[in-house]
Amino acid sequence: MKRRLFIASLLALATPALANAKIVKTPYKPAKVVFDFYLDDPQKIGSALYWIRSLMNPLLDEPYSYSPEQLDIKVVIHGTEIVTVARKNAAKYKDAVDRMRYYADLGVSFKVCGYAAEDYGYNAKDFQDFIEIVPSAIPELVHWQMQGYALITPNIQDKKFLIEAIR
């Protein structure tokens, strides 16, 4: 009997008290990031651009209040999403182009892989004016990582569930 009481008291002590999650304010520094956009469907560009927003918005807001000029963000485009920045597709991808132009105006650099551009039959005159063409995506990504930039590769998945259904 004493043994059972002893075990029960140990279990009671081991059970954590019910408490709320703790909100923390990580001391973020201004970001130096290179995004690797290599998407299997150009329609996913909108979701990929949300990754940029998810990086920038918290850093621009309180308590960090960094200015866009303090952030250093590059986007390397070398998948099917390359068609979204071709001038001839501007109407089809207007929302995405408008968002990229907005970010470019805030200082985000959008770079297209020269090899990918060649594969799609594009040259400099075919792209939006905020696009820079680099020789190749892979060395470009390596270059910026060697300069201390963090690499972020958006993982865009097909949404199967509504939040309300799985909450």
Image (cartoon, grey):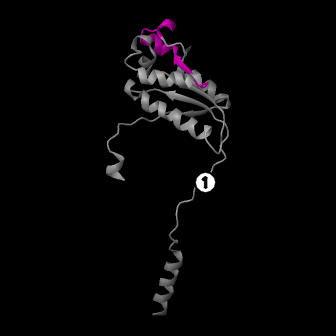
Asked if residue 156 is among those painted magenta in the image, a careful observer would answer no
Residue 41 visible in the current orientation: no
- Of helix, strand and loop, which one carries label 1? loop
Figure quadrant of residue 92: top left
Q: Is residue 164 above or below residue 89?
A: below
x and y, in percent, of residue 158 in the image: 35, 36
Residue 120 or residue 63, whichever sits in front: 63
Disc count in the image?
Answer: 1
Q: Is residue 51 left or right of residue 107?
A: left
Residue sitting at x 51%, y 8%: 124
Q: Amino acid at mark 1?
A: Val
x and y, in percent, of residue 110 in the image: 55, 21
Residue sitting at x 55%, y 26%: 103
Q: Which residues are magenta?
A: 106-126
Q: Is residue 31 above or below residue 85?
A: below
Residue sitting at x 46%, y 15%: 116
Q: Is residue 41 left or right of residue 72?
A: left
Residue 66 or residue 114, whichever sits in front: 66
Figure quadrant of residue 88: top left
**Mark 1 closeness class: few <14, some 14–19, many ≥20 residues within 10 Å:** few
Residue sitting at x 41%, y 17%: 83
Residue holding disc 1 = 24
x and y, in percent, of residue 109 in the image: 58, 22
Residue 61 or residue 41, whichever sits in front: 61
In this view, the residue farthest toward the bottom is 1
Asked if residue 122 is among those painted magenta in the image, a careful observer would answer yes
